[in-house]
Image: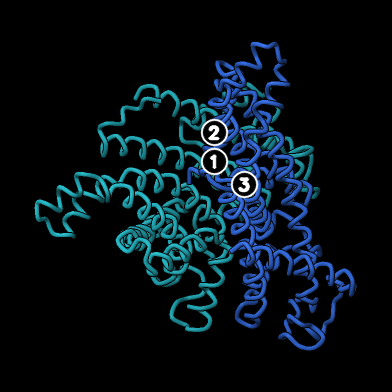
Amino acid sequence: MIKRFAGFCAVVFGVLLLTFLLIHLVPGDPVEVMLGDAVTVADRAQLRAELGLNQPLIQQFGTYLTKLAHGDLGRSIHTKTPIVELIKTRYPTTLKLAFLSLFIGLSIGIPLGIYAALKAGKWQDLIVTIVSVRLSAMPAFWLGPMLMLIFAVWLGWLPVSGMESNASIVLPALTLGLGLSAILTRMTRTSLLEVLNDDYIRTARAKGLTEANVIIRHALRAALLPIITIVGLQMGSLLAGTVITETIFSWDGIGRLLVESIEKRDYPVTQACVLVVALSYVLVNLLTDILYRLVDPRVKFAS
Amino acid sequence: MKKLSFSIFGFWILAVLAGRLFQLNPNHIDLNAILSLPNATYLLGADDLGRSILARLLRGVEVSFLVAIIVTAVTMTSGVLIGLIAGFYGGKVDQILMQITDIFLAFPGILLAIAFAAVLGPGLGNLMIALCITGWVSYARLTRGQTLSLRNRQHVQAAESLGASVPRLILRHILPLLASILVVEATYSLASVMIAEASLSFLGLGIQSPNASWGAMLRDGVRYMLVAPHYVLIVGLSLMSLILAINLGGDYLRDKFDVRTEK
């Protein structure tokens, strides 16, 4: 556990270093790129001083970390608002979307996976497998517009985009959730099939337990481990997927903030968004590991 | 499935060649044809500037393939090299290299590529640089894991005790055994690079107008979805067919080489 935590800290440090270095990858003078030509020399000097770009690199990194420790992510160049405020308003919106997508993914993926495993080898299984394999390969910027076209433009059931009504979340959440559900279906099916032939399942059946009881209490519990891993890993692509999905559906989350900041060359905001998303992912991975241990006491963080 | 994959590929290659042969111009603007439906002049309709969707689609797929092949070649070479070094030498070298890959893997999906493309500035070259910087990690991981176990195989040990040099050990005794798994990985990565390129172009970070790209076309298609739904539909279906073909091709190769994936 301690080793795992040390690894976690090392990765967090690496993420901080890489996001810090991002701004130094800007070709030429980052201040000039951000402000454009229409400003005075004094303005540039001020921004340079504010970003600390006139100090040695090591010292800059030190300042960056110190500020971060105090919850200071700097200011937006464009609107001058503290970036922390921007993140505070945008992050919950993204979380809402991510959790609903996760919910959709789980509530479609796991039942469908169980169904496919029970019908293994039959035509129902084949259809579920084919659909889920293909669906999981479909990128958000394909699935999103197609869902939008069908449910918003043609059928008119749901709003096209924006965040005005409560129903606005449905399409972006479906876009992210369907891809996830496809992956979960496959994973649930595979891991259930692996345990279904085990001795203890036969014993459970022999005891006269109902089929539902056997599947849910005995088989699914054992099959849960790989599913948890996949959910943890997929939370990452879910978080990254929000960038595209939020852009498609004009959903005002952190992904859209990132894209907007890139368009305005507001690099401190870009930097902060990348940092927040990456750190969320690292944290989710750590939590997955811990959960894994709780579910299966055999796992002792060996590696 | 194999036939389906090859026929979709064949279809696109023929279509691109035909487009070149008939000299379809992806940048010709016809103001009378703005957002027109498919018709005799514009087989797939026209976009928001009155340019032929067909011509732009074909030019877009050319660029997309080119990017995918170059990026895959670069990331595979560098990733495999790093993985071989880490797996062969082990110890401190391995630890440091794997720590670096861990950091890269901490950025989910294409987030890091988005970040790099954002600071490098838009454009085809920078897009490829961004995809190359972030793409080598999976190859490095895969190669390292395989090398680690191959390193202790008897034939490698035998060659080593006979005095074979390190490059010879790696190139003649380890790399050939990795070939099939890498070919399969590269096939899938063609699809993921194409998706990544389209994603970045969709966000306005990749190929810039007036050059055609599927990502940018999809974005325009979404923008004009209410007036011209055929636009986004055509681009979307084309993209899906190509990704499907590549993945089916990958599945075929995987089964043929009997490669076990850890998916």
Residue A152 visible from this viewpoint: yes
Task: Quote the CA–CA distance across marks 3 and 1.
Answer: 24 Å
Residue A263 visible from this viewpoint: no
- Which lettered chain is shown in cyan? A
Indicate which disc residue A145 carries: none
Return the x and y of residue B62 as percentages of the image width and height.
78, 61
The earlier-in-sequence mark between 3 and 1 is 1
| Residues behind callouts 2 and 3 on a single chain | no
Badge 2: few (under 14), some or many (20 or more) residues near its Cα, within 10 Å? many
Q: Which amino acid does label 3 sit on?
A: Val
Q: What residue type is labelled 1?
A: Phe
Q: What element carries label 1?
A: loop
Q: What element carries label 3?
A: helix
Chain under callout 1: B
Residue holding disc 3? B184
From the viewer's perspective, is residue A193 above or below residue A70? below
Cβ atoms at labels 2 and 3 below 8 Å apart: no
Return the x and y of residue B207 as percentages of the image width and height.
75, 57
Q: Residue at x 75, y 44 (%)?
A: A33
Chain under callout 2: A
Q: What residue type is labelled 2?
A: Val
Chain under callout 3: B
Cβ atoms at labels 3 and 1 below 8 Å apart: no
Q: Residue at x 78, y 52 (%)?
A: B124
Residue holding disc 1? B107
Q: Is residue B52 left or right of residue B9?
A: right
Q: Quadrant of residue B161?
A: top right
| Residues behind callouts 2 and 1 on a single chain | no
Q: In which quarter of the image is residue A61?
A: top right
Residue holding disc 2? A15
